[in-house]
Image: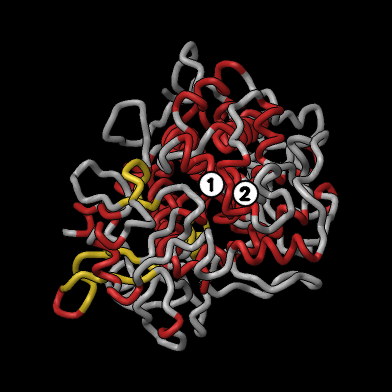
Amino acid sequence: MALHNPSTSGISRRRLIAGMGAGALVAGTGGALLGASPASAAFSDRFGRMFPSLPPFGSATTQMRNALVDMARVGGPMDARDPMSVGAQALADLQQHSVNNPDNFSIPQGMTYFGQFVDHDLTLENSAPLGTPVDPTTVPNRRTPALDLDALYGNGPTGSPQLYDSADPAKLRIESGGRFEDLARNANGTAVVFDPRNDENLAIGQITAAFILFHNRVVDLVRAQGTPAAQVFAAARQLVTWHYQWIVLNEFLPLIAGPGVVSTVLNGGRQFYRPEPGPTFIPVEFAAAAYRYGHSQPRPSYLVNSTGNSGGNPFYALLFDAGQNGSADPSDIRGGKRAARRYLDYEFWFQFFDGQVRWSKWIDVRHSTPIFGFPLPPPPAGSPGGNLIARDLLRQLTFGIPSGQRIAAAIGAPALGAFNFTELAGYGLGLDANTPLFYYILKEAQLQAGGGMLGAVGARICAEVFIGIAQLDPGSYLKVQPGWRPTLPARFSGQFTMADLLTYARVDPASRNT
């Protein structure tokens, strides 16, 4: 199932350039897509609510904050208790060490980090104090609520020249890590990217580098097709962005929400995410709860590549190892480092149908043990301490997010009962009957979908928001050209996947081996 209008034919390069919305591309705009309305008109720079009439799941008391932090403690109900002592290779290769943290044989391990890349395209919030209620409509979102790759492109060649090749400003900067591509870096090793989060770990840094190579090759394509010089960047960005939107809506979203839910929302319409007629916003039920399902998917360790270590041996790396702090080339996948072995062999990360793909972990309440020690920036002023998962839970209080049970009732979905949350009853706060949405959607995925994808509430929230922001974005293919289909080479006609993007970027297995 593809998200398009089958009654509308595909579009040529000429029509793509001419049909970018309200007007054609104009020289001197810094590569802006004039089909997209100004952010002040089309997009809100604040968050909002999807279920504004529902009450918060609980009160922001000290007892509640302490309970949420305790739920996320090492060894607590959200820790998979991975046997870290067996080492990175055994954790990556041997299922016997994953009894409490099963592999998800539906979602490749690279999709965890593609999902993070998408998140950084949609939201950036770092000001609301954790565990203290605030009105989300007053909280800034420093990204446009659209699948527009603003975290990649910044403000274009004119507004963000540091991101672009000074010898060819239509292209993004890219460097070598010693063997394969790496993000451009300053002398201190800091990546030259618009959003520093896109170098948080090796995987997202490499995916960002792949998107840069993809864009640069598309620049070559549109030039070869005779696009006027002043329009090359904007035409390339449009083509890249539409293919990225296609991947999000037609590969990624069906994997996490299920093709049935995606089809229901697409064909039956959005029922709960309806920001119109006002500007588009990202709801906190999505940003602070449902879409944070991805924190349950990282593996405790990875087969990063097959020949990166000395002697041409495989590079296995932990998700995070505090013992590697200070190392120039740590044996974990933290970001901000350059070394010849720090690259991805993408056949292990995305589905190339060659039998090599490795898998993410279940979507469930159990998180890989290393994530509880993952280094984090300081929280906003006035926030309690806590690891990544504790911060996720505290955000349920920050934004007054309803319980999963109340949202299930509101959308007519089968709700989990208090008996499904007996591990929370002991806190004496009613969390088993009014469960924080973040925790609820993880347990829901575990019980309703076997950990393979989101359950009813999580899937509906994610499907409505992703489809909604695409339908409401004046520059998206769903809005500008609903019948558009991918035009770049693909393994399956009329489709386009991450494997196809990586192949066009020439970082696929065949290109790596030439």
Residue drawn at (27%, 60%) of the image: 345
- Whether residues under marks 2 and 1 lie with C-beta atoms below 8 angstroms apart, the answer is yes
Query: Which x, y percent locates residue 3?
Result: 49, 25
Q: CA distance from mark 2 to mark 1?
A: 7 Å
Residue 395 shows up from this direction:
yes
Numbered circle sitting on residue 442: 1
Residue 229 shows up from this direction:
no
Query: Which x, y percent locates residue 415?
Result: 61, 32
Provide the secondary structure element on which disc 2 rests: helix
Image quadrant assignment for residue 48: top right
Point out the residue furthest to the top here.
Answer: 7
Residue drawn at (38%, 50%) of the image: 217
Which of the pair 480/73 is nearer the observer?
73
Name the quarter where the N terminus is drawn: top left
User: Which amino acid type corresponds to the residue marked 2 in the rendered image?
Assistant: Phe
Numbered circle sitting on residue 438: 2
Query: Which x, y percent locates residue 452?
Result: 40, 41
Provide the secondary structure element on which disc 1 rests: helix
Is 127 above or below relative to 320? above
Is 24 above or below relative to 61? above
Image quadrant assignment for residue 459: top right
